[in-house]
Amino acid sequence: MSMYFCSLASGSSGNCQYIATEETGVLLDAGLSGKYISSGLEHINADVSKLKGLFITHEHSDHVKSAGILMRKFNLTLYITEKTFRCIESKLGKYDPEKVVFIEKEKDIFIGDMIVHPFPISHDAADAVAYSFSYKDIKISIVTDLGHVPLDILTKIMHSNLLMIESNHDVDMLNAGPYPYVLKRRILSDKGHISNVLAAETIVRSLMYSDKLGYVILGHLSKDNNTPDLAYETVKSILSENDLIVGEDISLDLAYRDRVGKLYRLD
Ligand SMILES: [Zn+2]
Ligand SMILES: [Zn+2]
């Protein structure tokens, strides 16, 4: 029995990830149009009849834009913290209140044959969380939109087989770039986004704690303060400084802003 993962898109213009077992499918975030997400699911031959839930990380529009549309289109239950729900409630359109489940941080959610664990992250949102998704001994963790990576996050993502982690910006590019000073400060703060270097350091630490991690996907890349090549090469070189060879010790990939990524199958 397997687990599946695909990033339908990731970045400040929209996020949506697909996670599934043979029996249960879920979506993480809904930051793109319903049309894009539907065609992305079709593109990877996802069985949409198995889709059961939509999990939300936080209320920023790149994560929630089509939440109501997806709930209606695929008859999904929305899993969300109450504080985040209050921020997006008015934008959902018509919804069935019975299809909204308030989650609590650090409390497992059982959905079909999958266990989902939400945990808090530091971001400039009402009540941001990240999640890990498990089936038997297979675990997928997805951690984006966070300003820093304290030790307790490392313990949450420990023993993952696949980790999608934010690699938002190159600090020099951000500092030299056109963003207003206030926005630069926000991104670099503890409640902003993590850089390529911090992403790499987190991957190295994760591998120190567990040798289960086989696949790493860099996500939520900034359009203005990063490039796919720069993110990939920065992370690859920091891994190699730590004797971790991409392609041998670990598979490293990117989640794209504007196109569907690879469908992973984990056994
Ligand atoms: Zn975001
Ligand atoms: Zn955000």
Image (cartoon, grey):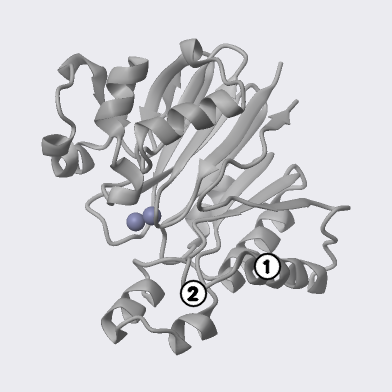
Residue at 29% x, 33% y is 67
Q: Position of residue 181 (x, y in %)?
A: 30, 86
Residue at 62% x, 64% y is 228
Q: Residue furthest left?
A: 90
Is residue 119 in view? yes
Which residue is at the front of the view, 157 or 251?
251
Is residue 159 in view? no
Residue position for label 2: 225
Mark 2 and mark 1 residues within 8 Å of each other at the beta carbon: no
Which residue is at the front of the view, 229 or 204?
229
| Mark drawn on residue 229 | 1
Q: Position of residue 29 (x, y in %)?
A: 39, 39
Left of 79 or right of it: where is 234? right
Looking at the image, residue 75 lies above or below residue 125: above
Q: Position of residue 16 (x, y in %)?
A: 45, 40
Residue at 25% x, 29% y is 68
Circle 2: residue type: Asn
- Say what secondary structure mark 1 lies in: helix
Crowding near pointer 1: few (<14 within 10 Å), some, many (20+)? few
Circle 1: residue type: Asp
Quadrant observed for ligand 2 in the rendered image: bottom left
Occupied quadrant, residue 91:
top left
Residue at 71% x, 29% y is 265
Q: Residue furthest right?
A: 248
